Amino acid sequence: MTKFSYKNVFLLGFGFFGISVLWPLYNAYVPIFLKDFALSSFVIGIVMTIDNLFAIFMLPYIGTLSDQTRTRFGRRKPYILFGAPLGALFFCLIPLMRDTKSLFLMMTVIVIMNFSMALFRSPVIALMPDITPSAYRSQANGIINFMGGFGALLAYFAGKPLYDAHYSYPFFAGALLMIFANVLVIVFIREPKEYTITQDKVSVIETVKKGNKELLDNLKDVFHSKERSLLFILLSILFWFIGFNALETFFTSYAKFYLNISESTGALVLGVFSLTFMLFSIPAGLIGSRIGRKKTISIGLLILMLCLLIVVIISAFSQNKSILLSMFFMLFAISGMGWALVNVNSLPMVVDMTKSEKVGGYTGLYYFFSMAANIFAPPLAGVFIDTLGYQSLMVFSIIFVTLSFVTMRFVRRGEVEQH
């Protein structure tokens, strides 16, 4: 039986830390680079969804494939060993392609970088349930989310002075941090012995065949199982990420065009949300293990609904900007804690609906639905805003958070496994 180790989970958290350093830098600066090529905002928006497109198609498959992989390094590490250095290399090349003035070269580098990052995300995250007993997976996921949040904050705060010195420096620094973080994972995390083999020769064709079969089995688990807990937890994940992503995408516009508050102040409100999410990630995992994951997620969703409802009311009736801002900072700080209760406990619920041999595939399913939300949310919320105005943004998010609360009522499995 696998023993739980806080030290091992913190070390594993560096894998998510490394991934989380790169994406804020990518999202902040790549659209600016693409403007050099005289692209419209619409086209840039499409380019910026490449990572999500790779994610929804590749993460379920790569996660499933890693379940069937057997090497002397284990079943997850080969994907990290191949994907992380390749992703770091092509991430470094992005600012260099800006100087070439070649859109073809820039797009080639961006596509390969996104492909490389998708190669190892599911295997990195699937290592958590691999090395963590069911009873501690909420706590472990809380630590991993804390490390990811720390990586994102580091990227935001350290990225600015580096960018001001030269626009390539954040990319070089981010790539080095990701390599360093994943080296720690490779060196110090030991995969379960049953997933390693001593011989060097591995049948790639056989692994792919098994992976294809398992992927079909996983899809059957979602849509054809008599007991629909997996389907309903995945729908809940889709719904609450649509609500969250709409806020993340349009809140600064909502602040500027509806509340007449500067977009930088709106971004600061979101920053407070991210900070309290990070700080509350570890307590959220402890709460989930103590009172149950479903109950914890439901409480988190209720907190989000209530806070967003109060935001709608005070936005409509308050005329005092200083009071309004103070309330926003407080409500979004509380919302960040609610979001931690939801987000930290959802992946452990999903992977505890299957056996250890299939956690990579189920991790991929989790990311399929969460990443699909990132594709659907901006256009859906945009239509809502175009039709009803910016004041409808909070209502849009409330609707989808409420839908996720309803679908969670039908989830019957995913709590700590009893041995």
Image (tube, rainbow, N blue to C red):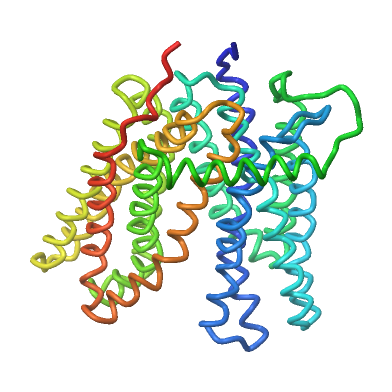
Above or below 107: residue 359 = above
- In the figure, is residue 253 to the left or right of 79? left
Q: State the residue lying farthest toward the left.
A: 317
Q: State the residue lying farthest toward the right.
A: 200
- In the figure, is residue 200 to the left or right of 142? right
x 47%, y 65%: residue: 375
Above or below 37: residue 188 = above
Q: Position of residue 392 (x, y in %)?
A: 22, 70
Residue placed most toward the observer, 298 or 226:
226
Q: Position of residue 61 (x, y in %)?
A: 63, 49
Quadrant where the image shows the C terminus: top left
x 74%, y 76%: residue: 98
Residue placed most toward the observer, 255 or 31:
31
Q: Position of residue 223 (x, y in %)?
A: 43, 47
- In the figure, is residue 375 to the left or right of 88? left
Residue placed most toward the observer, 102 or 154:
102
Quadrant where the image shows the N terminus: top right
Q: How many marks?
A: 0
x 78%, y 82%: residue: 102
Above or below 224: residue 132 = above
- Residue 151's quadrant in the figure? top right
x 27%, y 39%: residue: 410
